[in-house]
């Protein structure tokens, strides 16, 4: 949503970038090299559908090739345009640098309403779009690796991977040309949940630090915290589900396109999700809460944590003053505009920025890419060896107890958990948790270690830009 007098999404990203570089010692030339988008390819292609030729417009933007391949999702939405794709590509550069995945930033988009076409038609459109990008090396395991984004998922990624394999029949690493594929087609366990799981891990890490909680006027842990979620797509659904089911948080409101559901006692997220699947994505009529026709108004409800998990620009100059949440975690890309960010910071609202909070997707995409290049699933080599070592320890403890007459035994549930080696999902979650914790520490160090850095967003940009600059310098720039 664009409010009069407010910068566009692309301009917002640049303004936030410049807020950070004003506090850094970069040469003007290097600063400009990092900021600008290297290239954007626009493709217009025709597909014969329903008896006539339909023309579609798509984009693939490469922001920075300081590391290759470049990485970033492909979104399907009618709102897709060049500026948006370039802004998202820039965020990908900074995000990858922040969480230390060895990629440059890229993004793609197709101006289409995926709900307007049936599955077979969408496959034709996707394969033709992929063909246009593949033949220009804008999809390639070593150069440019897309992933799902808004409006796309495992299905579309599988089509793209197959299209690449058809066009590159001798490329042994063909499956690594795209991530977010279904597990049976070269994907990885835990990729679908990854961004939402990353939001959960980010909040857990935040709540480990008393000083940080105090800055957001919060205390305790996530148990009982009142949360409002905007957008129950893939990211919002998984974040809300994990936070409520595993951490004891209460999801008191969920805002969607056609309104919001509010329940102070907490919404059963899985039930709401099933309801939406049965009712064309609508929340209206859900019996587990009160319906609010104005979904955007739910952002202004009194709560502890606000999770915008849908589109960019939903919190803007027009509504920022009414936001009551003391803590916002940006599960979507760019949900808080530059103007809103200024207002919220002056109010004392603490924002966990998008380039960190929604980095779970690219982190697990990195694991999938590594898996595809190594041609072996995680855990296959070591899982049973882990179990055998654990069994030796348990048996020795039980023998000592018996021989010494100590009279204690190990609980069965402990034995079962201890004796189970790490499978792919457990290893993916472990790697994601470690990544989110390490990245938060790097931001926190800047936030608390410098008097001129007042918030986590500037800290995140400083960490990310410093790492990109370091890479460019090592290349001789």
Image (tube, helix red, strand yellow):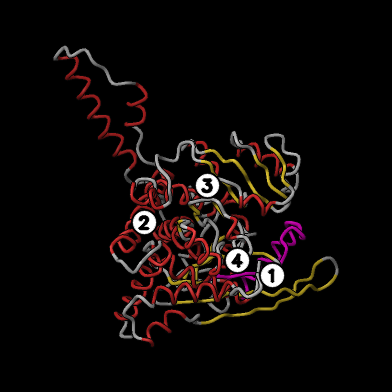
Pointer 4: what residue? 317
Q: Sequence-wise, which precedes: disc 4 or disc 3?
A: 3
Pointer 3: what residue? 239
Label 2, label 4: how far apart the Cα atoms are: 28 Å
**In the image, is residue 380 above or below residue 360?**
above
Left or right of residue 443: residue 277:
right
Q: Secondary structure at mark 2?
A: helix
Mark whose residue sits in front, 2 or 4 = 4
Image coordinates of residue 35 in percent, x first then y, are 45, 79
Q: Which mark is residue 111?
A: 1
Q: Sequence-wise, which precedes: disc 1 or disc 3?
A: 1
Residue 78, quarter of picture: bottom right
Residue at the image position 32 percent from the left and 64 percent from the top: 446
Q: Is residue 365 magenta?
A: no
Label 2, label 1: how far apart the Cα atoms are: 35 Å
Residue located farthest toward the right when viewing the structure as drawn: 51
Label 3, label 2: how far apart the Cα atoms are: 18 Å
Residue located farthest toward the bottom when viewing the structure as drawn: 29
Crowd rating for badge 3 (residues with CA inside 10 Å; few <14, some 14–19, many 20+): many
Find out whether the residues at labels 2 and 4 contact each other: C-beta distance under 8 Å. Answer: no
Find out whether the residues at labels 4 and 3 contact each other: C-beta distance under 8 Å. Answer: no
Q: Sequence-wise, which precedes: disc 1 or disc 4?
A: 1
């Amino acid at each position: 949503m664009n409010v009069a007098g407010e910068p566009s999404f692309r301009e917002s990203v640049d303004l936030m970038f410049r807020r950070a570089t004003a506090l850094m010692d970069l040469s003007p030339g290097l600063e400009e090299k990092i900021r600008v988008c290297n290239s954007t390819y626009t493709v217009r292609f025709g597909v014969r559908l329903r008896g006539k030729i339909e023309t579609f417009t798509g984009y693939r933007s490469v922001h920075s090739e300081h590391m290759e391949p470049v990485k970033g999702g492909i979104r399907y939405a009618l709102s897709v345009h060049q500026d948006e794709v370039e802004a998202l590509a820039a965020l990908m550069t900074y995000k990858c640098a922040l969480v230390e995945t060895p990629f440059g930033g890229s993004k793609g988009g197709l101006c289409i309403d995926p709900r307007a076409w049936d599955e077979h038609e969408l496959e034709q459109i996707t394969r033709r779009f992929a063909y246009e990008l593949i033949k220009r090396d804008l999809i390639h395991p070593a150069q440019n690796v897309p992933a799902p984004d808004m409006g796309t998922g495992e299905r579309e990624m599988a089509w793209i991977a197959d299209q690449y394999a058809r066009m590159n029949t001798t490329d042994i690493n063909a499956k690594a040309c795209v991530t977010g594929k279904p597990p049976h087609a070269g994907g990885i366990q835990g990729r679908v949940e990854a961004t939402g799981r990353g939001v959960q891990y980010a909040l857990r890490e935040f709540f480990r630090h008393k000083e940080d909680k105090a800055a957001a006027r919060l205390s305790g842990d996530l148990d009982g915290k009142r949360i409002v979620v905007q957008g129950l797509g893939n990211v919002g659904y998984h974040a809300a589900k994990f936070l409520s089911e595993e951490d004891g948080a209460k999801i008191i409101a969920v805002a969607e396109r056609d309104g919001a559901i509010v329940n102070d006692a907490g919404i059963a997220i899985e039930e709401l999700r099933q309801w939406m699947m049965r009712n064309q994505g609508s929340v209206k009529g859900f019996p587990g809460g009160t319906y609010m026709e104005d979904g955007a108004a739910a952002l202004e409800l009194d709560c502890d944590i606000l999770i915008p998990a849908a589109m960019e620009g939903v919190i803007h100059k027009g509504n920022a003053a009414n936001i009551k949440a003391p803590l916002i975690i940006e599960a979507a890309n760019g949900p808080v505009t530059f103007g809103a960010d200024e207002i919220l910071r002056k109010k004392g609202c603490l924002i966990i920025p998008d380039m960190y909070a929604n980095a779970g997707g690219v982190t697990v995409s990195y694991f999938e890419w590594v898996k595809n290049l190594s041609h072996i699933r995680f855990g296959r080599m070591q899982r049973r060896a882990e179990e055998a070592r654990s069994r030796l320890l348990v048996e020795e403890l039980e023998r000592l107890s018996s021989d010494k007459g100590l009279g204690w035994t190990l609980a069965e549930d402990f034995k079962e958990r201890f004796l189970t080696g790490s499978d792919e999902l457990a290893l993916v979650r472990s790697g994601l948790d470690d990544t989110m914790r390490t990245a938060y520490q790097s931001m926190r160090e800047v936030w608390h270690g410098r008097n001129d850095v007042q918030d986590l967003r500037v800290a995140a940009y400083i960490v990310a830009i410093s790492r990109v600059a370091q890479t460019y310098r090592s290349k001789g720039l």
